[in-house]
Amino acid sequence: MNERLKKLRKSLDLTQQEFADKIGIARGNIGAYEVGKNAPSDAVISLICKTDFSRGRVNEKWLRTGEGGDDNMFIEAPRDEQISKFVGELLKEEEDSFKKRF
């Protein structure tokens, strides 16, 4: 699992610190997981899979087993969730932006 964690983090273009901050754990834990010194607990795996990353949520089966290869690293959010996220991002735009006016 250590290689998959590292591959996941790199695919998200996050440093160990950024990844740790995103899921709410210490950076040292991420380093220990990635080199295989420690294995992430079920609670940490759950945190990773429940976090909404820029590319979506992590596929727990892929993270635990590698099943499906790297193409199955993320699961697609339901359509209504995608729309909600998109609208939320639009509302964060500057007041006079074209997207927000649209």
Image (cartoon, rainbow, N blue to C red):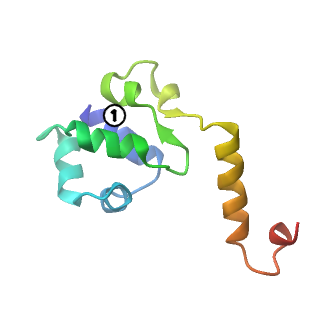
In which quadrant will I find the C terminus? Answer: bottom right
Q: Position of residue 16 (x, y in %)?
A: 31, 56
Q: Residue at (34%, 62%) from the top-left corner?
A: 21
Q: Nearer the viewer, residue 67 or 82?
A: 82
Q: Residue at (81%, 75%) from the top-left corner?
A: 97
Q: What residue type is labelled 1?
A: Arg
Q: 82 left or right of 95? A: left
In which quadrant will I find the N terminus? Answer: top left
Q: Nearer the viewer, residue 17 or 45?
A: 45
**5 vs 54: above or below:** above
Q: How crowded is mark 1: few (under 14 residues within 10 Å), some or many (20 or more)?
A: some
Q: Position of residue 43 (x, y in %)?
A: 25, 42
Q: What element carries label 1?
A: helix
Q: 89 left or right of 33? A: right
**2 vs 14: above or below:** above
Q: How many marks?
A: 1
**61 vs 92: above or below:** above
Q: 70 left or right of 28? A: right
Q: Residue at (45%, 22%) from the top-left corner?
A: 69
Q: For the view shown, which residue lies furthest in the right direction?
A: 102
Q: Which of 66 and 52 is in front in this view?
A: 52
Residue ID for mark 1: 4
Location of residue 86 (image quadrant): bottom right
Location of residue 90 (image quadrant): bottom right
Q: Where is residue 42 in the image (x, y as percent from the top left)?
A: 23, 36
